[in-house]
Amino acid sequence: MIFQLILIFIMIILAVAAVIFKDLINAVVACAAVSLITSILFYFLQAPDVAMAEAAIGAGLTTAIFIIAIRKTERHEKEK
Amino acid sequence: MNQIIGYLITGVGVAFLFLGALGVFRLPDVYNRLQAGTKCTTLGAFLSIIGVGIIEPAWFFKCLVIAVFILFTNPISAHALARASYKSGVKLWDKSVVDKCKEFEECTKVDPVREPFSNGVEGKK
Amino acid sequence: MILIIFFGIITVAVVLALIRALKGPTSPDRVVGVDIMVTITTAFMVLLALFFKRRIYLDVSLIYAVLSFIGVIAIARYLDRGL
């Protein structure tokens, strides 16, 4: 139980950091970490199949697609 | 007897995992952090998973497959990341003395084939 | 009982890697922190499978061991200009 509370706090911190970062590469890295913590939480809730899907999507697919999208556009977020 | 040996190996692995994370936290440079983290963490994960396979002998083959995959894929990502961070211009620490990569031209050279496709990258001329 | 101590040590290790991933000065520092977090978590999942006594839980760890380097490879290919 205490591990789940610690993991939820870590996940909230990483999600806030993913919004705050101005460099979009760092935001993508934070998104990958959020996906990792989500997978462990599904694991604790006794749902290994959902955790498997989350692992396969979050570890490889989301990061690669975000990187391709950043390559087509711009890396740094601009202030208007 | 199996239990004692398995828990001993798993404990050594967990200690290596903690030391790897401590090295990532304390060391001053990207390259120092990378070598501390990757070596310690690969050995720690390998020993932990093999220890679990020894505790439960029916799981040993599956644990061996997981450990071998970690042993293959972890140094590949570390090598690619170190090379990329050198090429993207991250400075070494002030007190590090050896820079072998500067002596070779091809390490800092930009690949001319891939150059026209890179738009939006910082530092592009 | 001894597994609970292992879980505590691993949680401290994850928090240390998280601090490095949050305050790293450059972008490869954060990637290193998250990569170390993924590897520690793979070992953590195997120990949790031993704690819950269920064999099917090892598959999640297998998928992380196979697929976790694709994201790092993609970021590394981006950082040295190109993909």
Image (cartoon, grey):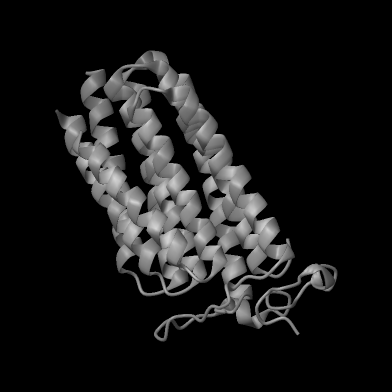
- Write the residue at 45% across / 59% down: A18
User: Measured along the vertical axis of the image, is residue A55 above or below residue C54?
Assistant: below
The image position of residue C81, as x and y in percent, is 71, 70
Q: Quadrant of the N terminus of chain B?
A: top left
Q: Residue at x 41, y 39 (%)?
A: A38
- Across and down, in percent, residue C56 comes to 44, 18
Tell me what residue is drawn at x 58 percent, y 38 percent: A57
Residue B86 left/right relative to A32: right
Given residues A79 and A51, the one toward you in this image is A79
The answer to whether residue B51 is visible is no
Relative placement, left or right, of B47 versus B97 is left
In the rendered view, tell whether residue C35 sits above or below residue C48: below
As drawn, the residue found furthest toward the front would be A80
- For the C terminus of chain B, which image quadrant? bottom right
At horizontal 26% and vertical 19% (from top left) the residue drawn is B2
Where is residue A67 shown, x and y percent of the image?
65, 58
Q: Nearer the viewer, residue A78 or B64?
A: A78
Q: Is residue A67 visible?
A: yes
Horizontal placement of C12 versus B86: left or right? left
Give coordinates of residue B90: x percent, y percent: 54, 78
